[in-house]
């Protein structure tokens, strides 16, 4: 017997739409986090490495910027891995994508 809202096939469709929405939100959050990381790298590494802005960078400024960005990326990666691991442990599942 069909319900007022249609057949029973609506439940799987709703679950698929819910999962798709969840994945979309996760992707948007990942993009926002990456943008925030890049902005912080730009702000902090520029402030640390460039004392007198000019039309070009000196070799020491380039080295400083490169090392600063590498450290920020490594720190962000470590924090992200630790966060994912902690959340996974709390949920009682293996962390997705770790070790790949």
Image: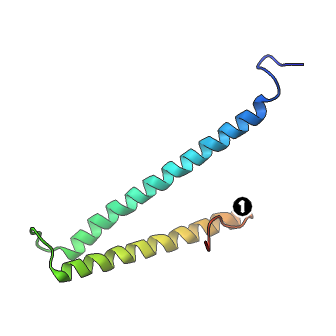
Q: Residue furthest top?
A: 4
Q: Indicate the position of residue 57 as horizontal and vertical percent values.
A: 15, 74
**Coloured how?**
rainbow
Judging depth in this view, the residue of 99 and 84 nearest the camera is 99
- Judge from the rendering whether residue 40 lies leftward or rightward of residue 77; answer left or right: left
Q: Indicate the position of residue 96 as horizontal and vertical percent values.
A: 65, 64
**Res 13 → quadrant:** top right
Identify the element where label 1 is drawn. helix
- Judge from the rendering whether residue 82 lies leftward or rightward of residue 64; answer left or right: right
Q: How many marks?
A: 1
Q: Indicate the position of residue 87 as horizontal and vertical percent values.
A: 64, 63
Image quadrant for the N terminus? top right
Judging depth in this view, the residue of 80 and 63 nearest the camera is 63
Q: Indicate the position of residue 59 as horizontal and vertical percent values.
A: 18, 82
Q: Residue at x 55, y 51 (%)?
A: 26
Q: Residue at x 19, y 83 (%)?
A: 60
Judging depth in this view, the residue of 94 and 6 nearest the camera is 6
- Up the image or down, 33 lies above or below 59; here it is above
Q: Which residue is labeled 1 in the image? A: 91
- Judge from the rendering whether residue 5 lies leftward or rightward of residue 33; answer left or right: right
Image quadrant for the C terminus? bottom right
Q: Residue at x 79, y 16 (%)?
A: 4
- Judge from the rendering whether residue 44 lies leftward or rightward of residue 98; answer left or right: left
Q: Residue furthest front?
A: 100
Residue count near mark 1 (Cα–Cα under 10 Å), binned few <14, some 14–19, many ≥20: few
Q: Residue furthest right?
A: 1
């Amino acid at each position: 017997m069909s319900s007022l809202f249609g057949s029973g096939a609506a439940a799987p469709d709703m679950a698929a739409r819910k999962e798709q929405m969840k994945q979309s939100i996760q992707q948007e959050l990942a993009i926002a986090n990456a943008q925030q990381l890049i902005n912080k790298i730009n702000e902090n590494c520029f402030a640390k490495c460039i004392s007198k802005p000019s039309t070009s960078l000196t070799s020491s400024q380039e080295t400083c910027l490169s090392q600063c960005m590498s450290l920020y990326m490594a720190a962000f990666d470590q924090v992200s891995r630790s966060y994912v691991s902690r959340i996974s442990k709390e949920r009682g599942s293996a962390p997705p994508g770790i070790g790949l």
